[in-house]
Image (cartoon, rainbow, N blue to C red):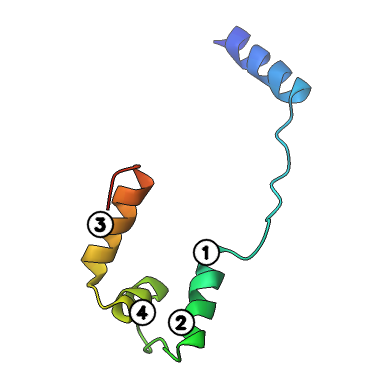
């Protein structure tokens, strides 16, 4: 086990992970802008995802299922 740990440490030093740089606004920021452009406001105890689902005219469960299917590469 020690050999594996040493090997991993050596590889991590040799090939450090590259820093992740955001290339633009996050998905949450994009959704917030989209909602604001349409005058849709979040209710006091409502999540961003629930507000987005309401704006799309679908249930939260339907939106979640759609996004999961898209993430899996399936047709929504």
Measured from the top left, where is residue 72 in percent x and y?
A: 34, 42
Counting residues from the N terminus, which is met first, the one under dot 4 or under dot 1?
1
Report the Cα–Cα distance between label 2 and label 4.
Answer: 8 Å
Q: Closer to the N terminus: mark 2 or mark 1?
A: 1
Circle 3/circle 1 CB separation < 8 Å: no
Cα–Cα gap, marks 2 and 1: 12 Å
Query: To which quarter of the image does residue 30 belong?
Result: bottom right
- The residue that mark 3 highlights is 65
Q: Report the residue at 70% width, 24% height from top.
A: 12
- Mark number, residue 27: 1
Q: Please tell me which of labels 3 and 1 falls first in the chain.
A: 1
- Cα–Cα span, label 2 and label 3: 21 Å
Residue ID for mark 4: 51
Residue to which mark 2 is pinned? 35
Could you tell me which secondary element the residue under label 2 belongs to? helix
Q: Secondary structure at mark 4?
A: helix
Residue at disc 3, secondary structure: helix
Whether tag 2 and tag 4 are in contact, CB under 8 A, the answer is yes
Measured as percent of width and height from the top left, residue 70 is found at: 34, 50
- Placement of 34 over or under 61, stated as above or below: below
- Judging depth in this view, the residue of 46 and 33 nearest the camera is 33
Q: Horizontal and vertical percent for residue 65?
A: 25, 57
Which quadrant of the rendered structure holds the N terminus? top right
Examine the rendered structure and indicate whether residue 16 appears above or below residue 59: above
Measure the alpha-carbon separation of dots 4 and 3. Answer: 16 Å
Q: Residues within 10 Å of mark 1 (few under 14, many from 20)?
A: few
Q: Residue furthest front?
A: 75
36 over 20 or under it: above or below? below
């Amino acid at each position: 086990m020690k050999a594996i740990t040493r090997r991993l440490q050596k590889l991590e030093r040799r090939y450090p992970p590259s820093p992740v740089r955001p290339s633009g606004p996050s998905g949450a920021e994009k959704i917030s802008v989209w909602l604001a452009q349409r005058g849709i406001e979040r209710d006091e105890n409502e999540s961003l995802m629930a507000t987005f689902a309401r704006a799309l005219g679908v249930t939260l469960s339907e939106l979640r299922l759609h996004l999961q299917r898209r993430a899996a590469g399936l047709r929504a």
